Image (spheres, rainbow, N blue to C red):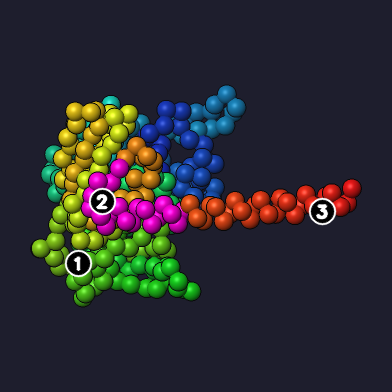
Amino acid sequence: MRYGPAERLLRLARSLAATRTGLTLDEMAAELEVTRRTAERLRDALMAMFPEMDSQDGDDRTRRWRLPGSTLIGVLEPRAETVAAVETAARECEQRGEADRAALLRDAATTLRAVMRPDALRRTETGIAALMEAEGIAMRPGPRPVLAAGVLPTLRRAILGMQPVVVRYAGRDAEEPATRILCPYGILYGGRGWLVAHVENLPEMRLWRLDRIVSADRLERCFLRREDFSLAAYAARSFGVFQEEPIDVVLRFEPEAAEDAASWTFHPSQFIVREADGSLTVRFRAGGVQEMCWHLFAWGTAVTVVGPESLQDTIAVLARALAQHHARIRACVDISNKSDGGRHDHAR
């Protein structure tokens, strides 16, 4: 990501104040992704602004510069996005049952708020709350894709400022990324990660894969947010992120998996019953049948879909297709091995 001159100065000042031993010129250049000569100019500018900045030679005779942290009090404030990101991470840990990590992250967020001046905290409180609301948590865990540099920070700021964004979006079958002007409302994490937004002047809300957004640029104007839209309600309709008509799901977990299943939140609407035989019944109402199946596969035979029939049928079809696919692969490998063996025998 490229930064403007003023932002680079502030970023360098923060880095110099955050290190105990100081930074060399090469480390400054690497931190800012600039040349050594540019790092020298930025260092000189900071020294002119902050006479308290000092330097010393290390054991390797390399000079390192450091800025006392007290110098930046009242100059640098934690951003709303930073506090919201820490508090969102705490919420994610809590939902995964990681209470200790959640407590540490909340303590970090409290510390960030504590170092902010009262007037600055007052200005950013609304932004923090808006970002916390805008960053939804999807239910399905799993690997995370690589996102284009700068996309997520731009989207967060656009959501906070209710600003349209120009995105280049690489569709599944498109030869070139398409350019769209989107009005962003929030982000759903889990799996790939999705932006909840509608095309400007078209009110229908859609999901946009974050890993397919090649670039994103904010427009210097605002859009009129839909008053009838709630990100929390939108996310709660589905098991993951795909929007479908909700169905009433009933799952039965075998006694040996009941304790593990009881520690999961499959959906905010869930209702859990511990049965007399030690099994666990989980009921919830949500859409996103295919995502449910993807998750249920991870439980193997420890879970049974009691209902509805549509979910039973879908998971059975997917399981058969998966089994047939790997059976074909296995057959091809066996045939190949036999063919190779025949040639070797002939050669001998």
Residue 231 visible (yes or no)? no
Q: Is the stretch drawn in magenta largely helix, strand or loop?
A: helix
Question: Residue visible at 45% across and 71% down?
Answer: 173
Region rendered in magenta: 304-322
List x then y, in percent, for residue 294: 37, 50
Which mark sits nearer the N-terminus, 3 or 1?
1
| Residue bearing the label numbered 2 | 239
Extreme-right residue of the structure: 348
Residue drawn at (26%, 65%) of the image: 206
Q: Nearest to the eye among marks 2 and 3: give it.
A: 3
Q: Is residue 52 above or below residue 266?
A: above
Name the residue at the left extreme: 227
Residue 281, percent across and down?
21, 38
Whole-angstrom CA distance, mark 2 to mark 3, is 53 Å
**In the rendered image, which residue does mark 1 sit on?**
222
The residue pinned by badge 3 equals: 343
Say what secondary structure mark 2 lies in.
loop
Q: Would residue 158 be found to the left or right of residue 232 on screen?
A: right
Tell me which amino acid carries mark 1. Answer: Cys
Amino acid type for the residue under numbered disc 3: Arg
Is 141 located above or below residue 261 in the figure? below
For marks 2 and 3, the one nearer the N-term is 2
x, y percentage for residue 165? 29, 66
Q: Residue shown at 41%/62% (left/top)? A: 212
Are there few (<14), some (14-19), or many (20+) residues within 10 Å of tag 2? many
Quadrant placement of the N terminus: bottom left
Residue occupying the point 18% across, 37% down: 272
Q: Nearer the viewer, residue 280 or 289?
A: 280
**Quick check: is 309 in the magenta stretch?**
yes
Toward the viewer: 177 or 280? 280
Residue 122 lies in quadrant: top left
